[in-house]
Image (cartoon, rainbow, N blue to C red):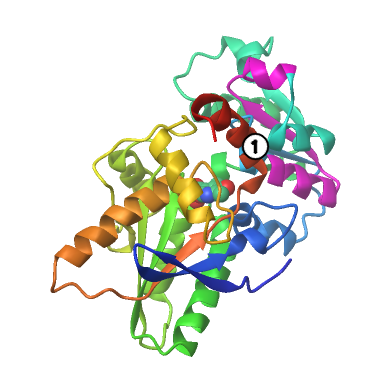
């Protein structure tokens, strides 16, 4: 693993934005998941034979967990609500990669036993599926990973990221800076802010800003609260008044992605376009409010490029070049 990840800069909205290149950490891991699953690499699990995860069939976490399982010699059982028909017919991206690594991708809605489970969300269904595993296996042989790595395991790797940011800010002699990253579950943003609040940053104030890409701001706040009840440790959520649907093709997202990629860094097509649209709004608002200081801004590039090929093909079919 290539750590610490390098920091480069781009020009965005006529100002310098630093970019933390977590996308360069590892060819086989999506940057964000490399951080979150760091714990599993640095600990031995002598009894574990099987790792159980859940999420979407295109998720970066599916692919990254399949790599982890392969390296560790574990079986990966990954539960998805359903497998989209285009993906079942033509496996590609994260899904294909995971299958090639020997992952069991299990569709709950088609499973003879589990399709009967009557629960609103995949998370709730997983609670019952987990019970089946515990009844049938020695619990020591199992490792459960919550959707998107939303669990305490993620803390260690995210704190390493936080430490790298502190070292950088001190070397640059900043007194204050802002870190921005688009959120899925919000786990990464939350653990980062909490780390900066409770760790000795040697006088630098580091504020974490984020935006929702899945659900709305209330959903994201709920996610934060499920991990940490103290709202002082929650990151600051920014938005541009628009609602985006995760994974849905959107012309403004496509144009923004093309725009930022012109700077010579390829960004991901799910999280980053929303991130930059919201950031654009934030920076414009700040500029019009003359008393606001523009602190140095660090954007965290969290990887996820494995899905771009499929997304780009879909975008081109819908909107042209
Ligand atoms: C998983 C992922 C995220 C979301 O991380 P959260 O901690 O769930 O907010 C963002 N970007 C990429 C590329 C990811 O793979």
- Quadrant in the picture for residue 65: top right
Q: Which residues are magenta?
A: 63-89
At which x and y percent is residue 28? 75, 52
Apparent side of residue 108 relative to residue 158 in the rendered image (left or right): right
- What's the residue at 55%, 69% (across, down)? 161
Task: For the N terminus, give its image quadrant.
Answer: bottom right
Residue drawn at (51%, 41%) of the image:
270
Quarter-wise, where is residue 50 in the image?
top right
Specify whether 286 is left or right of 170.
Answer: left
Residue drawn at (35%, 87%) of the image: 203
Q: Is residue 121 above or below residue 180?
A: above
**Toward the viewer: 78 or 1?**
1
Q: Is residue 30 magenta?
A: no
- Percent coordinates x, y for residue 102 in the rendering: 84, 34
Assign the C terminus to one quadrant of the image: top right
Rendering quarter of residue 142: top right
* Residue at 52 percent of width and 56 percent of height: 262
Left or right side of 74 for 207: left
Return the x and y of residue 115 as percentages of the image width and height.
60, 12
- The residue most toward the right is 73
Can you name the residue that lies furthest to the front here?
321
Per the image, the residue denoted by label 1 is 53
Q: Is mark 1 within 8 Å of ligand 1?
A: no
Residue 145 placement (x, y as % from top left): 62, 43
Q: Residue 254: tell me if it is visible.
A: yes
Residue 125 position (above or below residue 76) = above
Q: Secondary structure at mark 1?
A: strand
Say which of 283 and 25 sits in front.
Answer: 283
Q: Is residue 137 visible?
A: no
């Amino acid at each position: 693993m290539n750590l610490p990840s390098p920091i480069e800069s781009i020009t965005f909205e006529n100002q310098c934005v630093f970019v933390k290149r977590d996308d360069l950490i590892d060819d086989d891991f999506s940057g964000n998941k490399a951080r979150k699953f760091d714990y599993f690499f640095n600990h031995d699990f002598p009894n574990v034979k099987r790792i159980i995860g859940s999420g979407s069939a295109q998720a970066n976490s599916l692919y990254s967990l399949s790599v982890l399982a392969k390296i560790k010699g574990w079986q990966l059982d990954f539960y998805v609500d359903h497998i989209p028909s285009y993906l079942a017919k033509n496996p590609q991206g994260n899904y294909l990669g995971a299958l090639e690594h020997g992952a069991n991708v299990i569709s709950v809605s088609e499973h003879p036993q589990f399709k009967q489970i009557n629960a609103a969300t995949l998370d709730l269904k997983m609670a019952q599926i987990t019970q089946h595993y515990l009844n049938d296996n020695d619990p020591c042989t199992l490792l459960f990973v919550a959707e998107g790595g939303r669990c305490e395991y993620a803390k260690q790797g995210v704190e390493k990221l936080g430490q790298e940011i502190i070292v950088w800010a001190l070397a640059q002699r900043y007194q204050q800076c802002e870190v921005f990253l688009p959120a899925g579950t919000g786990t990464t943003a939350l653990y980062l802010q909490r780390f900066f609040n409770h760790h000795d940053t040697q006088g630098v104030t580091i504020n974490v800003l984020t935006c929702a890409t899945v659900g709305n701001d209330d959903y994201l706040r709920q996610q934060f609260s499920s991990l940490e009840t103290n709202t002082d440790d929650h990151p600051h959520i920014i938005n541009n008044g628009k609602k985006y649907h995760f994974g849905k093709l959107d012309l403004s997202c496509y144009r923004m992605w093309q725009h930022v990629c012109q700077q010579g860094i390829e960004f991901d097509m799910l999280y980053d376009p929303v991130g930059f649209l919201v950031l654009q709004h934030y920076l414009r608002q700040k500029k019009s409010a003359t008393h606001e200081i523009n602190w140095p801004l660090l954007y965290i590039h969290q990887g996820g490029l494995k899905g771009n090929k499929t997304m780009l093909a879909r975008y081109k079919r819908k909107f042209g070049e």
